[in-house]
Image: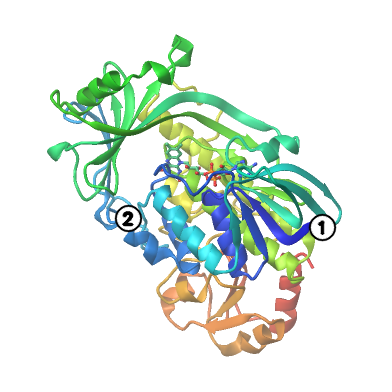
Amino acid sequence: MAERVQVLVVGAGLGGLSASLFLAREGVDVLTVERHAGTSVHSRAAGQNWRTMELFHWAGIDREVLEVSPRASQGLRITVATSLAGRVLHRLMNDGSEFDVSTSTTMPAGMAGQDVVEPILLAHAEKAGARVRFRTELTDLVQDDDGVTATLRHRDSGEETVVHADYVVAADGGRSGIRARLGIGTTGLDALSHCLGVVFDADLGDRVQAGVTDLFYLQHGDFTAGLVNTDLPDRYVFAPDYFPEKGESPADFTHDRLVSMIRAATDLPQLEPEIVWTGSWEIAARLADRFRAGRVFLVGDAAKVTPPTGGQGGNTAVGDGADIAWKLAAVLRGEAGPALLDTYEAERKPIARMIIDTSLHNMKQRMHPGLDVSGIGEPEDMLNAILGFRYRSTAVLTEEPDDGSRVEDINAPTGRPGFRAPGLASTVDLLGQSWVLLGTDDGWTSAATEAGIDCHVVKDELFASRYGLSRGGASLVRPDGVVAWRAKEPVNDPAGELRRVLDAVLSR
Ligand SMILES: Cc1cc2nc3c(=O)[nH]c(=O)nc-3n(C[C@H](O)[C@H](O)[C@H](O)COP(=O)(O)OP(=O)(O)OC[C@H]3O[C@@H](n4cnc5c(N)ncnc54)[C@H](O)[C@@H]3O)c2cc1C
């Protein structure tokens, strides 16, 4: 007989593990399967932006993530140069103090690699009740009105099992087999460039600033490459481009050739780097045409692949996972109508588009001046995209007049529905667990109790001004910390108004 679960998550990367953790925390019965034997061994996505850390804070893992990223508090320097001691072409970031996000959030950013963050997500997902099976791959999937029937195969024993799930989260990465199986196409630019990833140990002395994340984009006469330090002392990642169109392949980059490239990149001709890992990947900018097919939802790289120039691939995978989790939980509990699930694509796809376009413009500026960005959307300021993003869907009651903006300036948050509720010291711990009504006085308390949601009265003036409320006003904030609706002024029938609003935004 088929095993039954409420949600089957396929893939235990950042997207799948985030979905698993947030689903399990909501009490959903979740099974996660991953074809590899364990979590990622490569640090790939190093960096948690403030929004990711806010989500991690609400999931109770932010401190652990900061503990494994000691460089985080020290800053970030980004330099475009000919080599480490060569000519500096641009200094994109001096020390990270350029990032002043204090008006929008109290959260620090993290700099931990994927190799150390995934085990934290995994441990907490399991602690919250998620079942995770490694060496287990999905090999088939069919769905009907009642659910999804998935075939799983254990990669060692070859044993096949059948699972019946109410919903599936496809977090199976950029080459998503599930996306292909569902016939969902992608649009965008494939193979923008090809990179090697070379992890090496060496003493680079003062070529690299210790204690901060020191990221270089190198435009050397003989190659273009990224070079960055890691959380481990004397460990670096060197990522040179290679060009298949010129007949090059990763196999051409022998140990000796890599050593001489690292020497040239670091201006240390005698250096004896110890190469500990090499791999290769393709940089692409691809967006799935749909994020949903029936009961299956694409998250993370399965839904979009963005160039790394912006560092948002892993961060948006976490955001996707958290988003689909609270929506599935609300529908499975019967608190929301199934149409709430349509808001996943409506909200997350425009974010993916914005991140891809902005990262492509960054790529042109930092690495590939010749990149044709003429058919690509305008970039947004990355801080505004991360913290000032806007959702438009039926799960938000947009206020009129609507200025049509995709983001707002994080230094001037407005508290409008669709935007992140500003994370103030007085509010951050009231948010992120469930629906919550934040009022300026006691006038809304009984209405919230009647509607079955938490209500907190926040009396400081900073709250009222950042949330755009007059005395007697209130903001309704979703479990993901996004404002769903607000009453700027007191209303005549708070209970009736709140009931109508909740019915609308929860599609009931
Ligand atoms: C070199 C490099 C540097 C990067 N730097 C950054 C950065 O600085 N910041 C950032 O935010 N992002 C960065 N990224 C991007 C980031 O790594 C990805 O966006 C992120 O890993 C996506 O997570 P995911 O969970 O969607 O997919 P993945 O991490 O790819 O996970 C998908 C998982 O699904 C599994 N799977 C696939 N098919 C099946 C199946 N049929 N059954 C079971 N399991 C299956 C795979 O084994 C895999 O573990 C970088 C990527 C690379 C390659």
Q: Is residue 277 visible?
A: yes
Q: Which residue is mark 2?
A: 69
Q: CA distance from mark 2 to mark 1?
A: 45 Å
Out of 232 and 183, give the one closest to the viewer. 232
Toward the front, the furthest residue is 157
Secondary structure beneath disc 1? loop
**367 vs 208: above or below:** above
Toward the right, the furthest residue is 145
Out of 281 and 108, give the one closest to the viewer. 281
Q: How many marks?
A: 2
Q: Which residue is mark 1?
A: 1
Q: Are marks 2 and 1 in contact (CB under 8 Å)?
A: no
**422 vs 353: above or below:** below
Instruction: For label 1, count other residues whose C-alpha is less than 10 Å away and answer few (under 14), some (14-19) or many (20+).
Output: few
Image x and y of residue 459, in percent: 46, 84
Image x and y of residue 364, in percent: 42, 28
